[in-house]
Image (cartoon, grey):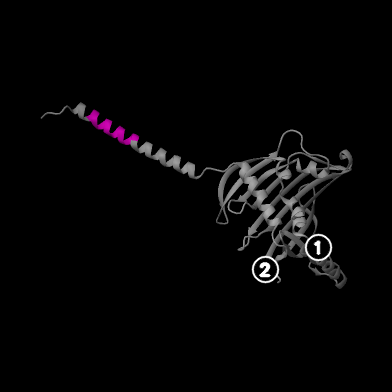
């Protein structure tokens, strides 16, 4: 039987077109399923979990959890950002219930004198006694100020993406001050109202893994800003999760520039923590 070549070619093209459409449909289905699996949570859900996490840490049983070393370098900068002078301090830090207690042990590589050590020990002991013997509910209320609804309500959050940080799923959020009237009765209020940045939230723990904050508008200092203003403030913070789920600040860089009367001052602090040692709870 004779076959029309043109008809055969047309039929072949139709079959290929149908097969192509099926392939495209399959790929679209896979893409949709992948998109659904990678759907990002609402910013309000993330911030709610952040507050719940803060309250859980605040309400934990008080007592020392970790001890580690912190090196702090304070630099005064010139107009080009170069260090003019610096001072290094070494602290022994005790972390208890999310609150660090710093005990100064060295200045510029020099061991503290006996009198200086006694003052530092006395200060650390006062902190320990107040912390360990404090009523749990009262203590939780004091520490609740770290992450509160009032603090987060100043900002507009947006969940940008999900990344892997230290082998853990992490949500990246950007934030900026909300428009409209914000609390502004204190210098701290004015400063908070002028900050924006990015925060990395561990998805499982709802705790902060990284933070980058910058000043987006000058903040007046003193009475109506007559004493000066903070013109630049940039903070970079990195945190590490311990095996038992406790989060500790490991690295921090703070850069500030402010005007004091007719003088502009610039400072940078660098802090790095190491030698983490878990403390056994006293019975």
Residue in the image at 81% along x and 63% along y: 130
Q: Which residues are magenta?
A: 9-21
Quarter of the image where the C terminus is located: bottom right
Observer able to see residue 107: no
Judging depth in this view, the residue of 205 and 4 nearest the camera is 205
Q: CA distance from mark 2 to mark 1?
A: 22 Å
Judging depth in this view, the residue of 27 and 206 nearest the camera is 206
Quarter of the image where the N terminus is located: top left
Dot 2 or dot 1: first in sequence order is: 1
Judging depth in this view, the residue of 141 and 101 nearest the camera is 141
Which SS type dominates the magenta stretch? Answer: helix
Give residue 180's position: percent from left, percent from top.
Answer: 74, 33
As for residue 92 lying within the magenta part, the answer is no
Q: Quarter of the image holding residue 125?
A: bottom right
75, above or below 32, in the image: below
User: Which label is found at residue 215?
Assistant: none
Q: For the residues labelled 2 and 1, say whether their Cβ atoms are less than 8 Å apart.
A: no
39, above or below 10, in the image: below
Observer able to see residue 62: yes
Q: Viewed as shown, does residue 61 lie left or right of 115?
A: left
Give residue 72's position: percent from left, percent from top.
Answer: 75, 60
User: Could you say whether the residue bearing mark 2 is in a helix, strand or loop?
Assistant: strand
Q: Is disc 2 surrounded by few (<14), some (14 to 19) or many (20+) residues within 10 Å? A: few
As for residue 14 lying within the magenta part, the answer is yes
User: Could you say whether the residue bearing mark 1 is in a helix, strand or loop?
Assistant: helix
Residue that label 1 marks = 130
Give residue 18's position: percent from left, percent from top.
Answer: 30, 33
User: Which label is found at residue 277?
Assistant: 2
Q: Quarter of the image holding residue 264?
A: top right
Q: Viewed as shown, does residue 280 lie left or right of 231?
A: left
């Amino acid at each position: 039987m004779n076959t029309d070549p043109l008809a055969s070619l047309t039929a072949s093209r139709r079959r290929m077109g149908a097969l192509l459409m099926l392939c495209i449909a399959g790929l679209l289905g896979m893409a949709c399923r992948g998109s659904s699996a990678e759907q990002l949570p609402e910013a309000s859900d993330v911030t709610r979990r952040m507050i719940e996490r803060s309250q859980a840490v605040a309400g934990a049983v008080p007592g020392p959890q970790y001890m580690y070393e912190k090196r702090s370098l304070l630099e005064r900068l010139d107009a080009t950002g170069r260090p003019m002078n610096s001072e290094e301090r070494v602290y022994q830090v005790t972390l208890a219930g999310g609150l660090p207690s710093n005990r100064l042990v060295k200045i510029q590589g020099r061991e503290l004198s006996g009198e200086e050590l006694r003052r530092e020990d006395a200060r650390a002991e006062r902190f320990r006694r107040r912390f360990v013997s404090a009523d749990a509910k009262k203590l939780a209320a004091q520490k609740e100020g770290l992450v509160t609804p009032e603090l987060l309500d100043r900002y507009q959050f947006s969940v940008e993406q999900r990344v892997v940080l230290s082998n853990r799923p992490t949500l990246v959020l950007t934030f900026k001050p909300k428009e409209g009237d914000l609390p502004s009765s204190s210098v701290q209020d004015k400063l908070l109202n002028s900050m924006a940045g990015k925060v990395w939230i561990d998805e499982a723990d709802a705790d902060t893994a990284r933070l980058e904050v910058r000043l987006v508008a000058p903040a007046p200092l003193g009475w109506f800003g007559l004493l000066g203003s903070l013109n630049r403030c940039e903070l970079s913070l990195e945190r590490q999760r311990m095996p038992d789920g406790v989060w500790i600040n490991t690295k921090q860089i703070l850069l500030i520039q402010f005007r004091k009367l007719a003088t502009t001052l610039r400072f940078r602090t660098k802090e790095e923590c190491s030698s983490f040692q878990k403390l056994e709870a006293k019975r």
